[in-house]
Image (cartoon, rainbow, N blue to C red):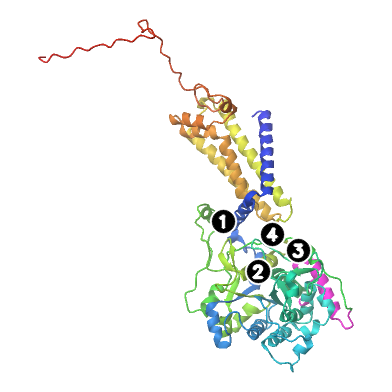
Amino acid sequence: MPVAQILKAVLISVVLTLFAFVGGKLNLFGFEDVMDAASDDVFQQITSGTYGDRPEEREGQDRIRIISIDETGIEALRQGGWNGWPPGLDSLGILIEDMAYGSEPGPRAIFLDLIITGASTDVPSVDLEAILDSELEATPAVLLLRSIAEVTQARAWSGQSACRTDPLIRLACIIEAGGTPVILARPDALEQNGLTELQRQLDNVALLTPVLVNVRNYPLVDDYAQGPLPGVYGFDLYPASALYAADCLHDILRNGQARACDGQPVFQQAAEAARAALRPGARSSVPGTQARDIWSTPVAVLWGSRQPDRQTELTARVSSGIVPECEDRMGVVERSLRSLFNALPQSTACAYTFNLGYDRIVAGFGLEQDDYRYIFEDRLILVGSHMLNSDWVPTPVHGQLPGVHYHAMALDNLVSLDSRYRRADTTWFSTDDLFQVILTFILLLAVILAVMGRNTLLEDFRPQWKSRPPLWATVAYYASLIVLVVGLTWLIALIGKSAWDQAVINWLGIMGLAFGVLFMAARLTFITDVGGPLAFVDTWTRKLEFGDRNLTRRRRPDETPQDSGVPPPPKRQRRTPSSNATPPGTRRPRSRRKQPDASS
C-alpha cells in the first residue's frame, strides 16, 4: 500500500477521533452518560461471574453479612413486642444488642440503614452521663441510647474532645476503648442544624453517616468547603468507607497488623491518635487524618454473581418454603453470547452478599452455635429493610435490590481490593479518556486501512478476480473486520479495567462509531462483493455512491466510480433516420390491411 494512502488514513482517523472526543465531552442530550451506563452494565453482566474467583477477592464476601427485615419478618416479630415498621426506639436498641452479642467474639462493626428521627420530646436535653444514669426515666429513646452506649463503650471515649477530631479517629477511639462501632444513618450534613435532640444525642454514642448516595458511583468522603459543621469536622464518611475503616482499625488496634489495608498511613495515624486520646492525662486535641485525600475518588461499584458459600444451606434450615437455586455456572463466553442476543436473566434469586432475616435469627429455629459464629464473629454487619416500600436500587446483575445491598457491595469492593478499587472518572481528562482516544484511533485506522487494503489486493495481487473476489474471500474479509473491531474494543476495555483500576470506558459507543465508519468506507464495495453478478447490484451501488459529482451535475449513465469495480452499463444505440423517413410536419399514411373474404 502506498505511503500516501497510509498517511491519508492516519489523518482521517485523527480527525474523526478528535470529533468523537469533543462530542463525548459535550454530552449532547445526555447521550454520552447513557452510553457509558449501558457499556458498564453489559460489561458487568458478562464478567460478574469472575468477581470473587481469586481468594483475595473473596475476603469481602466472607466477612460481610446483611441482616434483613421484610414484611414476613415483621409479622413474626410482633410476638416479640414490635409494633410494625418502622420499629419502636426500644426495639431498635434490642436489635443492636442482638447484633453485638450474637456470638463471642462479636462483629467488628454494625451499620443500621435506617434514619432515626424521633420527636423533640423523646429525650431530655441533658448530658450523656445523665442519660446513662439509671435514675433517669427509661423512655424508649433513653433505652436506645443506653443500648448503643453499652455496645460502643461510650463512657470511655465520648468525653474526650480528641475523639471528635474526625470520623476516622472516632472509630479508632471506639475500638481502642473495647467497644464495637455502631454506624447510624442520618440526613445530609448540610441539614445538620435541623437534627432533632435525639439525633444529637445519638451522635454522642455512635457515628452518624449520610446514606443518600449516587446509584452509579459510590462516594467515600463528603468534603465540606464551608468548614466544620456541628458533629462534622470538615468531612464525612459514608457507610461503606466507615465500615471499611472500622475493619482496618480493628486489625491494627486489636490484632497488631501494622500493614493492614495495604499499609495506608491514614489508618495508622488514626490508631495512634486514639491511643493518645484515651491515655491518662491525654491532650485535648490531636491532628486530624487525611482520609479525604485518599478517598477523594468514588467507587465505580463492581457487582458479582457468585453465591455465598452457606447461603443455600442456612436459608434451607430456617425456611419452610422452597429455597431457590442460585449457583451461577455460566462462563464468560456463554455470558457474552447470551448478552449479545439479550438472553441473560434480568435478575438472580440470590444477591452476592450473604443475607438472612432478623426474625429467623431471633427465633433460632434450625440454627446452631456454630452458625451464629459464622454469621457474627469478626463480621461487618449491615442491617437494612427488604420491605417493598423501602429504597430499591437498580443493579446491572441482580435487577432491583434493596439499598442496603448497594452499601454492602461498595464495602465488598473496598475490603477485597483495598486501594485497588475501581475508580470512577471525575475529572475532565483522565486515563479513562486516554483509553477511549487510543481505542477510537486504533479502530478507525484499522477499518480504513482494511478497506484500502481490499482494493490494493484486488488490483496488485489478485487481478484474476477482476475486482470481484470469490464468495469465500468476501466472507473471510468482512468477518475479519468484525472480529477486529469487537476484539480490539474488548481487549482495551479489559486492560483499562484490570491494569489501571478504571471504570469501563464507553466501548459500545466506540464500537458503534467504528462500524459506522466501516459501512461508509465500504458502502460501494460491500454490495458488489456480496451480490456478485446479480443485476440489481449495479443499480443499488450507484444509489449509495456519494461524491462531489452528485452535488454539482447529473451523472451520465456511463459514469461509475473508479474504485468500485462496477462495470459501466452498455451504451444505448440511437436509431438513425432511414432513407424513406417521413419529413417533419407531414403525416405518414396508414397502411390498410385487406379484410379477409368471408367465403374464404
Magenta segment, which residues?
253-282
Residue occupied by mark 4: 422
Q: Are marks 1 and 3 in contact (CB under 8 Å)?
A: no
Q: Could you tell me which quadrant the N terminus lies in?
A: top right
Q: Amino acid at mark 1?
A: Val
Compare marks 4 and 3 and give the one earlier in the sequence.
3
Compare marks 1 and 4 and give the one earlier in the sequence.
1
Looking at this rendering, what residue extends furthest in the top direction?
Answer: 579
Work out how far the residue at label 4 is from the one at label 3, CA to CA, in angstroms.
12 Å
Q: Amino acid at mark 2?
A: His
Looking at this rendering, what residue extends furthest in the bottom direction?
Answer: 135
Figure quadrant of residue 294:
bottom right
Secondary element type, mark 4: loop
Compare marks 3 and 2 and give the one earlier in the sequence.
3
Q: Amino acid at mark 4?
A: Arg
Placement of 247 over or under 27, stated as above or below: below
Residue occupied by mark 3: 295
Residue 69 visible in the shown view = yes
Residue occupied by mark 1: 332
Of residues 309 and 296, which is closer to you in this image?
296
Compare marks 1 and 2 and give the one earlier in the sequence.
1
Work out how far the residue at label 1 is from the one at label 4, CA to CA, in angstroms.
20 Å
Secondary element type, mark 2: helix
Residue 494 horizontal/vertical position (percent): 64, 52
Secondary element type, mark 3: loop
Residue 103 horizontal/vertical position (percent): 65, 83
